[in-house]
Image (spheres, rainbow, N blue to C red):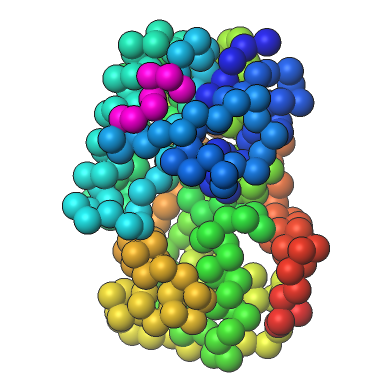
C-alpha cells in the first residue's frame, strides 16, 4: 500500500478516482481549496491552493503517487493559461522537493495539423511542466469524456434537451474520439498503481469510435429519443455561439468559449500510443458510453426531454 495524493478531489474526475484507489488498498489524501466540497471517502484532506502554492508541501509530504487533476478555466483575472501554468509549476516544484515517484495527469488531445486553441495549448503547457516533476510521470490526453458528471457531456445534453432546432456551425465536420468515463478512470488507476510504469510518458486516449462533432450531437439526440432537426450554419460564429449556448445550457461562458474554440480541427488519438493495450483496459463503445451516462444521470435527476 502507498500514500496517494489526489488534487482536485472535489471535482468530477478526482472524486471518481478516489474510491478505485481505496478499493485497491491505497491510502488516499485529498488536496482542495475548499475541503468541505470533498465528498469522497479519503483518509485525510489538506486545504490549499496550487496557484499560490499554499499547502502543497504539506499535502505532498510522504506521498508516493500524486494525481494532478486541477483546471482553472473559470474565475481567473490574468487568463486561465497563465493561472494553470503557475499552478503546475508550483505543484511540480513541491513534488520534486517531496521526492514524489510518480505524477499522473489528465489533459487534452492536441491537433496535429493546426495550432492548438488556448484551452488545448494550456493543457499541453501543463503536461510539459508535469512530465519533469517526477521520474515516472504519466500524462493522458483525452477529447470529450462521456459521463454523467462530465461538464462537456452535460453541456451537450442540455443543448439537445432545451433547443428545438440544433444549429451546427462549420466545425461540425471535424472529427473527435470520445471516451467512456469508465475507461478514463481505469486508465488513470492503472497508471498510478501498476509497478511496470517507468520513465515519463504521454498517451493519447480515445474510445473505439471516431465521429464528427455533428454526428456526436446527433447520436446523443437519438439516444435521448427526441426529435431535434439540425440546421447547418456556414460559419463558425464561435464567440457569439458560445455565449448563446452557455445561456441555454446554464453554463459559465468562461468555460464554454474556450471549449468551443477547440472545435476547429480534428482531435483524434494517435493510434500508435495504444494506451488501452499498454494498461490492459477494454474500451466501451461510444453508444454504450452515452446510454450508461444518461442512465446514471436519470437515476438522480430526470431529463425533461426523455
Image point (53%, 59%), residue name: 151
Q: Nearer the viewer, residue 70 or 289?
A: 70
Instruction: Locate residue 305 relative to residue 153 in the image: left or right.
Output: right
Q: Specify the quadrant of the image occupied by residue 227.
A: bottom right
Q: Position of residue 10 (x, y in %)?
A: 55, 44
- The answer to whether residue 245 is above or below residue 256 is below
Any magenta on residue 56?
Answer: yes
In what quadrant of the picture does the N terminus appear? top right
Image point (64%, 70%), residue name: 220
- The answer to whether residue 124 is above or below residue 231 is above
Instruction: Locate residue 230 relative to residue 87 in the image: left or right.
Output: right
Q: Position of residue 237 (x, y in %)?
A: 30, 79
- The answer to whether residue 32 is above or below residue 292 is above
Any magenta on residue 40?
Answer: no
Q: Position of residue 34 (x, y in %)?
A: 48, 44
In what quadrant of the picture does the C terminus appear? bottom right
- Residue positioned most to the left: 78
Whether residue 56 is visible? yes
Image point (30%, 80%), residue name: 240
Query: Which residues are drawn in magenta?
Result: 53-59
Whether residue 286 is visible? no
Q: Nearer the viewer, residue 300 or 281?
A: 300
Q: Specify the quadrant of the image occupied by residue 87.
A: top left
**How many discs appear?**
0
Image point (35%, 34%), residue name: 50
Q: Position of residue 32 (x, y in %)?
A: 48, 38
Amino acid at each position: 500500500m502507498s500514500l496517494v495524493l489526489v488534487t482536485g478531489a472535489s471535482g468530477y474526475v478526482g472524486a471518481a478516482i478516489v474510491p478505485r484507489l481505496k478499493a485497491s488498498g491505497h491510502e488516499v489524501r485529498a488536496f482542495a481549496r475548499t475541503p468541505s466540497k470533498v465528498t469522497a471517502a479519503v483518509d485525510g484532506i489538506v486545504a490549499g491552493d496550487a496557484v499560490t502554492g499554499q499547502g502543497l508541501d504539506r499535502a505532498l509530504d510522504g506521498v508516493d503517487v500524486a494525481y494532478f487533476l486541477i483546471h482553472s478555466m473559470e474565475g481567473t483575472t490574468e487568463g486561465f493559461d497563465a493561472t494553470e501554468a503557475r499552478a503546475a509549476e508550483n505543484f511540480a516544484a513541491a513534488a520534486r522537493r517531496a521526492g514524489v515517484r510518480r505524477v499522473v495527469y489528465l489533459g487534452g488531445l492536441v491537433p496535429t495539423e493546426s495550432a492548438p486553441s488556448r484551452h488545448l495549448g494550456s493543457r499541453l503547457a501543463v503536461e510539459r511542466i508535469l512530465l519533469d516533476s517526477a521520474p515516472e510521470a504519466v500524462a493522458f490526453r483525452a477529447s470529450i469524456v462521456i459521463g454523467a458528471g462530465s461538464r462537456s457531456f452535460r453541456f451537450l445534453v442540455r443543448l439537445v434537451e432545451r433547443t428545438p432546432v440544433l444549429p451546427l456551425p462549420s466545425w461540425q465536420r471535424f472529427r473527435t474520439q470520445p471516451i467512456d468515463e469508465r475507461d478514463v478512470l481505469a486508465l488513470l488507476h492503472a497508471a498510478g498503481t501498476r509497478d511496470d510504469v517507468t520513465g515519463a510518458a504521454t498517451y493519447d486516449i480515445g474510445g473505439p469510435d471516431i465521429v464528427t462533432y455533428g454526428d456526436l450531437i446527433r447520436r446523443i439526440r437519438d439516444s435521448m429519443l427526441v426529435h431535434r432537426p439540425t440546421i447547418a450554419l456556414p460559419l463558425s460564429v464561435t464567440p457569439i455561439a458560445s455565449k448563446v449556448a452557455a445561456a441555454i445550457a446554464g453554463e459559465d461562458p468562461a468555460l464554454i468559449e474556450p471549449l468551443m474554440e477547440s472545435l476547429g480541427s480534428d482531435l483524434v488519438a494517435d493510434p500508435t500510443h495504444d494506451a488501452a493495450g499498454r494498461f490492459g483496459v477494454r474500451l466501451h463503445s461510444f453508444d454504450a458510453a452515452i446510454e450508461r451516462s444518461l442512465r446514471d444521470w436519470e437515476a438522480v435527476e430526470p431529463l425533461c426531454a426523455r
